[in-house]
Amino acid sequence: MSDSVDPMNPTEPLGQLPKPATAIPSMAQVSKERKTAASTVLQKIRTSHPRASRIPDSVFAVIILLSAISVFAIVVLVAWELIDKSRLSLHQFGIGFFYGHDWDPVAGSFGAMPFIYGTLVSSFLALLMAVPLSIGVAVYVTEMCPQRLRAIISFLVELLAAIPSVIYGLWGIFVLAPLLREYVEPFLARTLGWTGLFTGPMYGLGMLAAGIIMAIMVVPVIASITREVMTAVPQNQREAVLALGATRWEMIRMGVLRNARIGIVGGVILGLGRALGETMAVTMVIGNRPEIAKSLFAPGYTMASVIANEFTEATGDLYLSALVEIGLALFIVTLIVNALARLLVWSITGGTARVRA
Amino acid sequence: MSAPSAPQQVGLIRRFTNAGATTFAVAAAILVLVPLLAIFAYLVIKGIGSVNWAFLTQTPKPPGEVGGGMANAIVGTGIILAVASVIGVPLGIGSGIYLAEYGRNRFGDLVRFTADVLNGVPSIVIGIAAYSLVVVPQKHFSAFSGGVALGIMMIPTVARATEEMLLMVPNVIREAAYGLGIPKWRTTLSISLRTASAGVITGCMLAFARVAGETAPLLFTAFGNQFWNLKLNQPTAALSLQVFTYAISPYDDWHKQAWAGALILIVLIVGAVAAVRITTSRGMLKGGS
């Protein structure tokens, strides 16, 4: 601003802006005219900073670096503990652990397939319901709703994320499950029973209940990220698309969603991560039976729930070790999910991911 | 296919799509808010009847006996959360600063990746890790181990939020500070972080809220306790654990208590969130100097 006007003007820069950086090279000339004021400022800058700043700066950098290293160290430690504690089961069962169908602690046979199946199906169900809903909410909040409602709705959606999973579970057991049993499941069985996905006895508690509960829990994760990235899209993008004659939806699709898609993908992946590892609510509503059934009404079991239910009751080292191995598998799956997400983001952006700094 | 009629037809389809999309978005918003309202309504309706002075001041009674409360669990949750915040917030903000201000290199990418991984690690797995890192060497369940588990879970959320918010601070502001001869640490703390403080605090708040009701990692770290315990190295009751135990129990009286406990838990969490929101919007929590 000031350099285009007149950098040499002795009254303007020092008066308007306190100690401007551009003034330093020209100080020599300025100070001749205005010795007292300018030279004291210069004195202050010169004497206080160069020497004083170096040591605190490097101390600060070291502290910050240490806390960054701690994040790395924690992940390594967690991984190491999981590998170490599951060694027994890894040796005993090998890779067969993951496709074994039998989970019988009494007989000493452990196969994790029913849990892996339950985790994948319930998470997939949850995302199927949550992704369109969350994008819809985010679009409504950022682009459509009246200014007054905006803050309220986004606060309410945020509140969904603040509800602990044990409360979702409580609500699932006493409210959602009876509702499903009495109304939703009979309806689904009548209309979509021919698919084979909605047959069998209706308990209320089961795979479907787990999927619905998780969908509710995942929505705020995806929606808040989507909303954030959509808000970050510059206003003139919208105005430009509108000026070309687009309808509101076309403006949202071309001007906003296209620019925000990377963040949306990130949000969906985050949601998937939360769904895969969700423990308490699912444990409370899925029915906890290690079986693989095609029907979504049937009870299931997930990897996280079996750990939650049986870890403290595990008798014997092999049992405990098998449970830790399930934890290890869960850990590795989330690692792969995150790596995939990053690759995806990189492939979409073509290496220009970090422009918004 | 004559030239004048084509735009008209497209216009209709476009208008229809536009209306459809609008309807869908409104419906989605309503559909998402319904369960929220339903959960809160049920919490209040079913929980309020069992919240009384005894509930807030007494310890649990054995099954079959009516009465008793969750006072020890409320205090236990407070203790565990305090430990978690002491561990999670400084480490999280520190690594967030590293990622934003120093981490534009290979190691920064590595830390960013591991933070992502840690964020994705299911809470129950963190519980296992805390169990074998703290509980096994200590030889008993403890409030401290629960705090460690929750603290670890807070770090990536706080770090991510801090990094994102710091990256949103325009570089011009940093350059202006450097131009004034302000050292980097001071610029980072008093200018960048301060500018971003509302966002950073929101991040901490989200991390806290996420962790406050967490049950899974406490199952085999804090473990739960039917009696009073204020020591860090003893098994400690937590509100969320108590709600879980009572909810899956067969006793009707315990179900009522579970609803009451859940109500208290949600009030504590929403209260904390709201308090932080109010203070941030007043600008009282501008970190730094």
Image (cartoon, coloured by chain):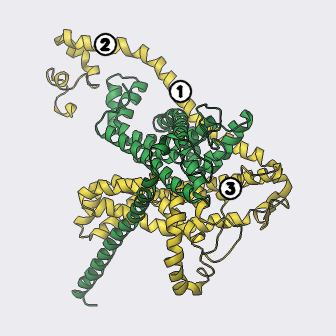
**Please, what is the three-letter code of the amino acid marked with disc 3?**
Asn
Select label 1 or label 3 by which is in front: 3
The quadrant the N terminus of chain B occupies is: bottom left
Quick one: label 2, few (<14), some, or many (20+) residues within 10 Å?
few
Q: Colour of chain A?
A: yellow
Q: Colour of chain B?
A: green
- The image quadrant that residue B24 belongs to is bottom left
**Please, what is the three-letter code of the amino acid marked with disc 2?**
Lys
Q: Which residue is mark 2?
A: A44
Q: Nearer the viewer, residue A22 or A125?
A: A125
Q: What residue is rendered at 52% in x and 73% in y? A: A180
The quadrant the C terminus of chain B occupies is: top left
- Residue at far top of view: A36
Q: Secondary structure at mark 3?
A: helix
Quick one: label 3, few (<14), some, or many (20+) residues within 10 Å?
some
Above or below — where is A71 with respect to B259?
A: above
Q: CA distance from mark 2 to mark 3?
A: 66 Å
Disc 3 is attached to a residue of which chain?
A: A
**Please, what is the three-letter code of the amino acid marked with disc 1?**
Ile
Name the spot of residue B269 as percent of width and height, x first: 44, 46
Say which label, 1 or 3, has the lower sequence index: 1
Left or right relative to B226: residue A58: left
Q: Nearer the viewer, residue B67 or B276?
A: B67
Select label 2 or label 1 by which is in front: 1
Q: Which residue is mark 1?
A: A63
Above or below — where is B255 with respect to B6?
A: above
